[in-house]
Image (cartoon, grey):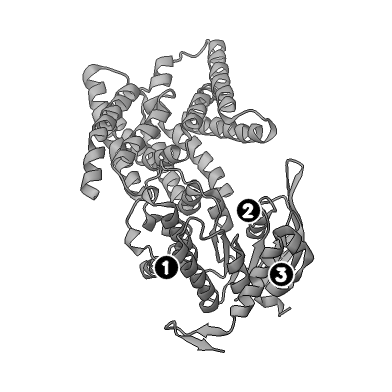
Amino acid sequence: MSSENSTLVKLNNAGFKQNDKWLVEGVSLTVEKGKIVTLIGPNGSGKSTTAKIALGIYKNIEGSVEKYTNKVGYVPQKISIDWTLPLRVYDFMLLTENIKEEAIDEALTLTGVIHLKNKNLGNLSGGEFQRVLIARAISKKPELLVLDEPVQGVDYTGEIALYELIKRISDTLNCGILLISHDLHTVMTATDHVVCLNGHVCCSGTPMDVAKNNEYKSLFGEKASQILSVYEHKHDHVHSEKGEIKKN
Amino acid sequence: MFDDFFIRALFAGIGIAFVTGPLGCFVVWRRLSYFGDTLAHSALLGVTMAYTLDLNIAISVFLISSVIALILIQLQKKTNLPGDALLGLLAHSSLAVGLVVIGFLTFIRFDIMGLLFGDILAVTTDDLLIIWTGGAVILLVLKLIWKPLFASTVNYELAEAEGLNPDRAKAIFTILMAAVIAISIKMVGLLLITGMLIIPAAMARNISDSPQKMVIFSIIGGLLSVVLGLYSSLEFNTSSGPSIIAASLVLFILSLFKIKQSIKLKN
């Protein structure tokens, strides 16, 4: 564990109950600056709930949340926007904070949707809207980024590029990221710490630790732990900025 | 200058339109039209209280409407009834209680038509003062809570997650609604105030592609409605409220013809 002041958000045995049913309970985790923490788990295992607890959206929680930053960027899993609002992408970028025009353009360019800047939000496709959501969250230059299935609906090549972007943002902004992802490949490659949920924390640790864990295997099956071994074997080269392959 | 009742009414209406424009946009965006109706209906109780206790009507209506809004919030927390049922319950029961109380106050002559539909003859210089200072305060407060209120209108969880405190903004907005009803009741009448909030905003939606534009067009629509409505009210000797609302309806219908054109222009 590193020093206290690099901690951005800390959950201590946190849980949330709705209509007398626990959505998730007993979660402890810490997101630190420059680190990516990923939540994995089957549907209904409490991943989004955990993210919302960390964000302070739920008020009556068990346990406690310590949040050390107010500069937060959030990409929710589900977002329903009411189209009685005339809202352009540009207006949406300014939703929670007044950001400079250059920062908006930069973020929209990074996620590849700068051409949509003056389009109405209601006319975007699912994938385009997802890219705008990510752009909005990163344009604030947040200290804590919470991404709940950020690349849903994005095409395959875009997905890889966006995950690379997320990794780069965590490095350049030195922000902490709480990521929820279905894609075990991504989880295992870009994450510092994995928390595997199933209504409670079933196991957690580095990707390697988790992949070896028996509970993880029973939750996701043998195949899932092989993903990691496949990945580990691939790990014999790195890419330079221009994309050239360098052998380790 | 304010000696003439018509000039007074005109300035009162202009002051009201500046406030109902932006607030009306939020009423449309947040689907609060029935909530506005409920507050307006409860205003009748406020009026009777003003007469019995010899208070200023606007202040008394503001107090009662705020209390009704608080009761609504409590009922929403404590019962399982759907929101519209609670609104209906409060709207009609407060209207009924107001009318019953009026029945008991036989020593005061009430102009019921004026209360329900507005009366331009009733606007005094004191009212003008209340409308313009009250209106300025409402707009100032709305500007202060604009960011959290707007963000939570778009998406509550985003606003909450990114630290904007949307619940506080919502509570303040509720008070602003009570205030706008209080200052406009004499002019527009309690049955038609919601129309003044919604129709110019709805008209503006048809011709706007951004929230700021919608607010500006909504104010312009309200101003035009007031001027057109009041002149025709004078001309045809009709109640001021219905005349203003009818004028705003005409503008709304005209805006329907604009929709297709403006979409073509933008592409």
Q: Secondary structure at mark 3?
A: helix
On the picture, is A124 further left or further right than B67?
Answer: left
Q: Are marks 3 and 2 in contact (CB under 8 Å)?
A: no
- Mark with earlier residue (3, 1): 1
In the rendered structure, find residue A57 and report the number of the disc placed on it: 2
Residue wearing tag 3: A211
Q: Nearer the viewer, residue A110 or B28?
A: A110
- Answer yes or no: are tags 3 and 2 on the same subunit: yes
- Which one is closest to the eye, mark 2 or mark 1? 1
Position in image of residue B259 (x %, y %): 26, 38
Question: Which amino acid is tagged 2?
Answer: Ile
Residue pictured at 50% horizontal, 35% vertical: B178
Question: Which amino acid is tagged 3?
Answer: Ala
Q: Secondary structure at mark 1?
A: helix
Q: Answer whether residue A191 is visible to the viewer in this image.
A: no
Position in image of residue B143 (x %, y %): 43, 51
In the rendered structure, find residue A107 and report the number of the disc placed on it: 1
